[in-house]
Image (cartoon, rainbow, N blue to C red):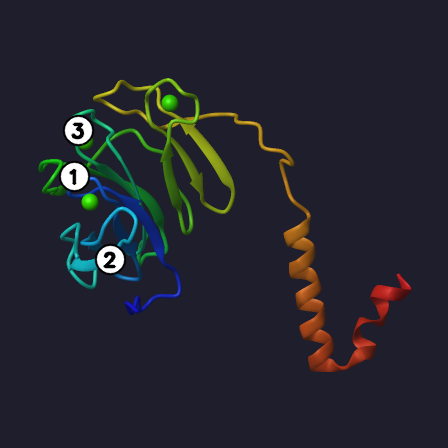
Amino acid sequence: MYWIGSDRTGVCFGDIDADGDQDLLVGSSYWLALFRNDGTKAVPQFTLVTEDLLNTGVPSADYYFTPTLGDLDADGDLDMLVGTNTPSGGAGLEFYRNIGTPASGTWQKQSIPLPAGGANTHPQLVDFNGDGLLDLAMGAGSLQFFVNTGTSTSPNLSSSAAVPVSPAASLVFPLRIVAAQLLRHRRRRGPGHVRWLREG
Ligand SMILES: [Ca+2]
Ligand SMILES: [Ca+2]
Ligand SMILES: [Ca+2]
């Protein structure tokens, strides 16, 4: 088992070395690691290649890396969006263009139109409107969608898209949180302290 050293772990797959099988990226507290698939398509076996795929230094100044892969400039290799947090309390979404080759990638942080992101941003590149351009779904406290209004070689992922999701808001999880908090309070202070809940 690989020790992550983090309470939050971002995982994604992609064929990083263009050999036909799925390799593994693991983002953790202070680094983004690459594991090459040395097995087969049917029986994967992952080998750590580097714990600093983005050459940010270990530990990085940013943390909680959450990667997603896709060819955003149509040159045949996998580029990357990475959600991060920063020591100053900020959070963001960063673009890393693959300036290497499909078989041997090198990722360089570059600027493209992106949403700001939020706390613990989790991006996912996917062509959700079927126009051939990768779009962005993003979890950042809420579920958000951004349509790619750029071109196949020059992405623009800054345009928020209204994608219907039903139900739009869930009451299940907030109610679970309230119930868990009440239960903790009851255990700590005794049964009488939640009687108001039953008596209205
Ligand atoms: Ca591979
Ligand atoms: Ca590319
Ligand atoms: Ca699209």
Residue at 43 percent across and 27 percent down: it is 128
Residue at 42 percent across and 45 percent down: it is 118
Does the numbered disc 3 mark a residue whose Cβ is under 8 Å from ligand 2? yes
Would you say 121 lies left or right of 169 here? left
**Mark 2 = which residue?**
45
Q: Quadrant of residue 129?
A: top left
Q: How much space separates mark 1 and mark 2, taking CA atoms?
A: 16 Å
**Mark 3 = which residue?**
76
Q: Quadrant of residue 18?
A: top left
In the picture, the disc for residue 18 is 1
Residue at 34 percent across and 66 percent down: it is 6
Q: How much space separates mark 3 and mark 2, taking CA atoms?
A: 25 Å
Quadrant position of the N terminus in the picture: bottom left
The residue under label 1 is which amino acid type? Ala
Q: Are marks 3 and 1 in contact (CB under 8 Å)?
A: no
Does the numbered disc 1 mark a residue whose Cβ is under 8 Å from ligand 1? yes
Does 140 appear above or below 200?
Answer: above
Does 155 appear above or below 14?
Answer: above
Question: Closer to the observer: label 3 or label 2?
Answer: 2
The residue under label 2 is which amino acid type? Gln
Quadrant position of the C terminus in the picture: bottom right
